[in-house]
Amino acid sequence: MVWPTVRAVLTVVAMTGIVATDRLSSMERGLQGKVALVTGASRGIGAAIARELADAGAHVALAGRDEATLQETARSMAPGNHALAVKADVADTSDLDRLVGKVVAELGGIDVLVNNAGLMPPARQIYNVDLDEWQTVMNINLRAPWYLSKLVHPHMKARGGGAIVNVSSTSGLHHDIGLGVYGISKAGVVMLTEVCAKEWARDGIRVNGIAPGIVKTQLAGSIIDYLKTRNIKPNPMNMFGEPEDIAKLVRFLASDESRYMTGSIIRIDGGELL
Ligand SMILES: NC(=O)c1ccc[n+]([C@@H]2O[C@H](COP(=O)([O-])OP(=O)(O)OC[C@H]3O[C@@H](n4cnc5c(N)ncnc54)[C@H](OP(=O)(O)O)[C@@H]3O)[C@@H](O)[C@H]2O)c1
């Protein structure tokens, strides 16, 4: 049989340290040669997603507003694949046009889009939200995922399909006082996911969403401090998520392992909403 022989060779190679064992298993995960675009990839959840997709064999385009931090994340990714850092503000639709054009020109197309970039404004009651804040949050958290999905649609369709993963939040599924405008934008992401999933299934494009609870990143820093200083449990597991916990789920939804899933919103929250 050929397989045990190949396996034995891979194991020997791994044992010699030429290729790390965890790298082999990542390669087996199946995004080999795919092109992925991740927004908000400079830090936090997006950076972990970019690294996870690269570990699974993808060429990854990283988008964000700060070139230096994007380059830093790109350098932390598995070698051997292309890592393309593109400075882009997702609130600016002309930046998004340029972003998709550049990824297609330099990496040859797009198979996976992860709409991750997001902003959570300081907590305040909804009557204290002004027009500027409403517009900024909606443009970044909701308009950008719609506009980018629309831009990548023809490219994915031309390749026979693709996968889009939208990062919503538990705040998009239930209301936390003070997080109204953020929650409304993330609830919009849930419906955007369902709309695109239903309309684009015929094009072979799967669209799924995730709803993380509290994850240890800059965005959640003040909430984590607030809960810790008051000894408040964030969820039944009394646990904050790591960016890598989220990245593994995104890798699954981006790959053919989830081939029978579209339009799903998966909570990943330590049981927060139970
Ligand atoms: N952390 C949590 O507890 C949690 C829970 C549920 C959902 N989420 C969601 O997860 C996603 C990632 O959040 P995170 O926790 O990783 O936050 P983070 O650490 O603050 O990272 C946010 C990322 O988005 C980018 N970004 C923000 N505004 C942007 C813009 N206008 N254009 C381009 N990039 C922009 C940031 O890069 P630059 O600032 O350099 O541009 C950064 O890379 C967000 O959609 C967030 O709503 C987070």
Image (cartoon, rainbow, N blue to C red):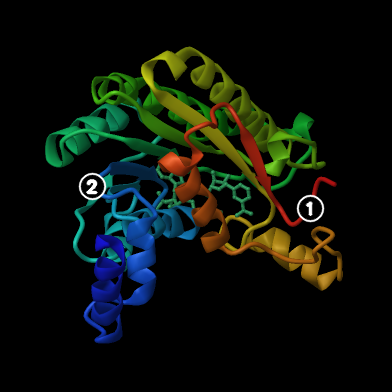
Quadrant where the N terminus sits is: bottom left
- In terms of secondary structure, where does tag 1 sit? loop
Residue 165 placement (x, y as % from top left): 48, 37
Q: Which of 271 and 24 lies nearest the eye of the viewer?
A: 24
**Against 30, is 223 above or below?**
below
| Corner quadrant of residue 131 | top right
Residue 104 placement (x, y as % from top left): 19, 33
Amino acid found under the numbered disc labelled 2: Gly
Residue 128: image tag: none
- The residue at the far bottom in this view is 16
Residue 215 visible to an observer of this rendering: yes
- In terms of secondary structure, where does tag 2 sit? loop
**Against 52, is 15 above or below?**
below
Closer to the observer: label 2 or label 1? 2
Amino acid found under the numbered disc labelled 1: Gly
Question: For mark 1, does the 10 Å Cα neighbourhood hold few (<14), some (14 to 19), or many (20 or more) residues?
Answer: some
Residue wearing tag 1: 271
Along the horizontal axis of the image, is 193 left or right of 36? right
Q: Which of 3 and 139 lies nearest the eye of the viewer?
A: 3
| Corner quadrant of residue 95 | top left
- For marks 2 and 1, the one nearer the N-term is 2
The answer as to whether callout 1 falls within 8 Å of ligand 1 is no
Residue 142 placement (x, y as % from top left): 53, 29
Residue wearing tag 2: 33
Q: Which of 128 and 25 lies nearest the eye of the viewer?
A: 25
